[in-house]
Image (cartoon, rainbow, N blue to C red):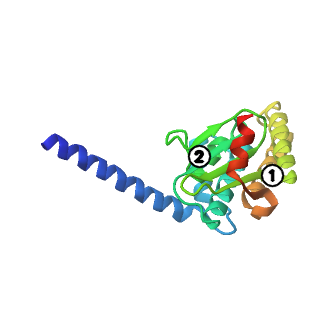
Amino acid sequence: MAINNFKILSRVVFVCTMSLAGLWNSAFAVVADNIPSSAMYSQLEAFHGHVCAGSIFGARLGLAAKEALKTAGGTGKFSAQYYELSCPVDGIQVAAGTTYGNKALTVQERGEHRLVLAAEENKLAVEAKLTKRAEELGLKSRDLRKMAKALPANAPERSQLEREVEEIHSWLKGAPTDEVVIVTAVNMKVKAISSAR
């Protein structure tokens, strides 16, 4: 009997801890205009291992989609589908809370930076994509980073390139959501039929 009580107690403690973590997470998730806070970006850097345009993209896509789906009345567990196995996946996990671990994230390798976030209970869904400007800046930061890494660590040119990368990252992190992400409602029945083909 004591073992069963211990199992029950440990599960209750786990659920309470995760609930508090969720409250804490949502408390610092958004500063304004669905822009992730600096605390979320710090959490993302720790999770992803470094700062890059891709992980920032994921955070912006994930948070914008989550907030849009909540606003539209999405209920139940949210699940995500992303169409590129790359750095944005980590940003989506942190910002939207849809992780591989909770089986709420799947990735189809199609080479598209596109997120579909769906509410499982009432089947509402939104699609989030990057704006052309955001995609272009992401590619530019990647190219600049490669150029910087090819230079000696103490080269002035490297410092200049790294500053340019930082400026791009700062813009991607703090620009108004509509300058980085485009979110639209999608019809889940249409998506289910088209993905079955």
Q: Position of residue 72 (x, y in %)?
A: 65, 65
Of labels 2 and 1, the one closer to you = 2
Residue at image coords 66%, 69%: 32
Q: Quadrant of the C terminus?
A: top right
Q: How many marks?
A: 2
Q: Is residue 117 above or below residue 47?
A: below
Residue at image coords 87%, 40%: 157
Residue 39 location, quadrant: bottom right
Q: Position of residue 73 (x, y in %)?
A: 60, 65
Q: Position of residue 190 (x, y in %)?
A: 73, 48
Look at the numbered discs 2 and 1 and tell me whether their residues touch, using CB distance below 8 Å: no
The kind of residue tagged 2 is Gln
Tell me, yes or no, if residue 149 can be seen here.
yes
Q: Position of residue 194 (x, y in %)?
A: 75, 41
The circle on residue 111 is none
Residue at image coords 12%, 42%: 1
The kind of residue tagged 1 is Ile
Residue at image coords 80%, 52%: 168
Q: Secondary structure at mark 1?
A: helix
Q: Identify residue for label 1.
A: 168
Q: Nearer the viewer, residue 167 or 36?
A: 36
Q: Is residue 19 left or right of residue 151?
A: left
Q: Secondary structure at mark 2?
A: helix
Q: Is residue 28 left or right of residue 178?
A: left
Q: Is residue 73 above or below residue 50?
A: below
Q: Identify residue for label 2.
A: 93
Q: How many residues crowd mark 1 within 10 Å: few (<14), some (14–19), many (20+)?
A: some
Q: Nearer the viewer, residue 158 or 186?
A: 186
Distance (Cα) linking label 2 and label 1: 22 Å
Q: Is residue 174 above or below residue 189?
A: below
